[in-house]
Image: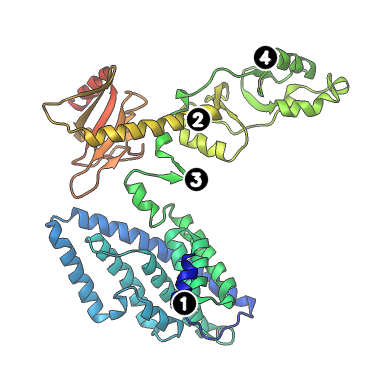
């Protein structure tokens, strides 16, 4: 509806007009493949430079009100010599489409745009990252097009067309969202001739970028705040909880030599949906479901003395008691099974993890986070308040991170599994933002303090450790 209204008022026109172009030679896809690799690497460089620059500005011991002024001065001096980096850059993108930017200048523009955008945002200036990533991709595309034209002048006739594919590839490399990039660039050009090379370069770019670096330009910011999203879940909720906390001993174990007749007796007596097969020493071999048995029942009379448990068992993915529930969530996400065997170092089955129990724990952790977040927003810890009781026997208090915590992760310190302590909030030195519900991989740094909750006895035990 918004697009229709916009076209009705302003008219239906393309933001960028491409030169006459027809994709005819499949060999040219090799050049777009190289463009995808190039922009993928540039995307990772952009992401890392942006957040490294932000961190540098945060640690800079300068009054906050001066930082945007200093950043503006740096960008202004850079743009004085290379004005192409100023603003959104649509004029420069238009020039790139028409092959009107020199080869040497392109290399400088790409690196300087990454630098200028990072300095602007890091110093507190106003700006986004979406259009700069498109701009960087356009310049990288023209650079690739010019090189391709020099090497294959009969194949690459219009180097500027590579800038369009580069725009999509640049967006995809930074955001890890290739479909969005493809649709957006098509909407900006409304030219079907560029679709195939655009899709090819964009998907390659996104694949390269996400293979080199797990986080996009948006999700890395969340990760640095302690929020790690994966397949729609905040895996931080589960990364610090071990399998041993939800292991179930209620499972059915069958020895590998058990005949089909005896298996059916066990099924009728004990019920159950899943059966786990072990050898004489108790080592796990595999599992089978009730649905599998239904297929065999029709031929039970013929097969009863021929088939044993080992014949119908198949190995499931297994977990150990020390694995965290994030790993279990990943496994359940890739399988339709409702339970997984828990195996010890000797390969013996110790119990099972049920899908429904994992979901229950996840939902409880979400509720706990919501309640705790509301409490933390209202609590102010002072020497006078000390520990604040939140429930029968449970308290919340604040600790400074002692020297022997510095450089170690929450998981390495085993605050939850060993001491029963939940770290609710990491307080950072200003101007760095506090990190609510940090992941188990959070590494303590100098100047940190943290708010923790747990049983009163556990908190007192932690006090003794901290005061060592």
Q: Do callouts 3 and 2 mark residues in contact (Cβ within 8 Å)? A: no
Q: Do callouts 1 and 4 mark residues in contact (Cβ within 8 Å)? A: no
Q: Quadrant of residue 175?
A: bottom left
Query: Which residue: 25% across, 77% down?
Result: 79
Determine whether the residue tagged by mark 2 lies in a helix, strand or loop: helix
* The label number, if any, that marks residue 231 in the structure image: 3
Question: Separation of disc 3 and disc 4 at Cα?
Answer: 36 Å
Determine whether the residue tagged by mark 3 lies in a helix, strand or loop: loop
Query: Which residue: 64% across, 80% down?
Result: 24
Mark 1, residue position: 163
Q: Earlier in the sequence, mark 2 or mark 4?
A: 4
Query: Which residue: 69% across, 27% down?
Result: 289
On screen, residue 73 versus residue 353, left or right, reads: left
Determine whether the residue tagged by mark 4 lies in a helix, strand or loop: helix
Determine whether the residue tagged by mark 1 lies in a helix, strand or loop: helix
* Residue 408 rendering spot, x and y as whole percentages: 29, 37
Question: Separation of disc 1 and disc 4 at Cα?
Answer: 67 Å
């Amino acid at each position: 509806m918004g697009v229709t209204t916009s076209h009705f008022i302003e008219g239906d026109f393309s933001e960028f007009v491409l030169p006459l172009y027809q994709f005819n030679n499949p060999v040219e896809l090799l050049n777009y493949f190289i463009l995808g690799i190039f922009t993928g690497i540039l995307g990772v460089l952009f992401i890392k430079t942006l957040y490294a620059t932000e961190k540098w500005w945060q640690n800079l011991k300068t009054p906050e009100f001066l930082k945007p002024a200093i950043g503006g001065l740096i960008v202004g001096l850079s743009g004085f010599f290379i004005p192409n980096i100023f603003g959104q850059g649509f004029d420069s993108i238009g020039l790139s489409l028409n092959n009107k930017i020199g080869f040497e200048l392109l290399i400088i523009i790409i690196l300087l745009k990454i630098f200028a955008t990072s300095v602007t945002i890091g110093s507190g200036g106003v700006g986004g990252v979406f259009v700069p990533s498109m701009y960087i991709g356009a310049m990288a595309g023209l650079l690739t097009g010019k090189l391709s034209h020099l090497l294959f002048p009969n194949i690459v006739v219009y180097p500027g067309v590579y800038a369009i594919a580069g725009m999509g590839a640049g967006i995809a490399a930074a955001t890890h969202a290739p479909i969005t990039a493809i649709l957006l660039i098509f909407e900006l050009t409304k030219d079907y001739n560029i679709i195939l090379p655009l899709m090819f370069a964009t998907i390659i770019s996104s694949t390269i970028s996400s293979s080199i670096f797990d986080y996009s330009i948006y999700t890395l910011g969340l990760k640095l705040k302690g929020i790690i999203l994966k397949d729609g879940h905040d895996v931080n909720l589960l990364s610090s909880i071990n399998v041993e906390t939800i292991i179930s001993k209620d499972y059915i174990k069958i020895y590998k030599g058990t005949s089909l007749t005896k298996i059916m007796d066990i099924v009728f007596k004990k019920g159950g949906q899943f059966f786990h097969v072990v050898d004489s020493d108790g080592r796990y071999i595999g599992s089978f479901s009730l649905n599998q048995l239904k297929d065999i029942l029709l031929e039970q009379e013929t097969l009863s003395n021929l088939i044993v448990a080992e014949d119908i068992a198949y190995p499931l993915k297994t977990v150990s008691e020390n694995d965290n529930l994030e790993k279990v969530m990943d496994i359940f996400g890739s399988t339709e099974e409702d339970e997984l065997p828990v195996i010890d170092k000797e390969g013996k089955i110790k119990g099972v993890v049920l899908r429904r129990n994992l979901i229950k724990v996840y939902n409880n952790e979400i509720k706990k986070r919501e309640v705790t977040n509301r409490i933390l927003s209202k609590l102010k810890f002072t020497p006078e308040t000390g520990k604040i009781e939140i429930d029968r026997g449970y308290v919340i208090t604040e600790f400074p991170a002692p020297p022997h915590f510095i450089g170690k992760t929450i998981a390495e310190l085993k605050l939850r599994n060993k001491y029963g302590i939940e770290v609710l909030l990491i307080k950072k030195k200003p101007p760095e933002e506090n990190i609510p519900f940090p992941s188990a991989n959070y590494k303590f740094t100098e100047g940190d303090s943290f708010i923790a909750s747990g049983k009163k006895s556990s908190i007192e035990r932690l006090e003794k450790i901290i005061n060592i």
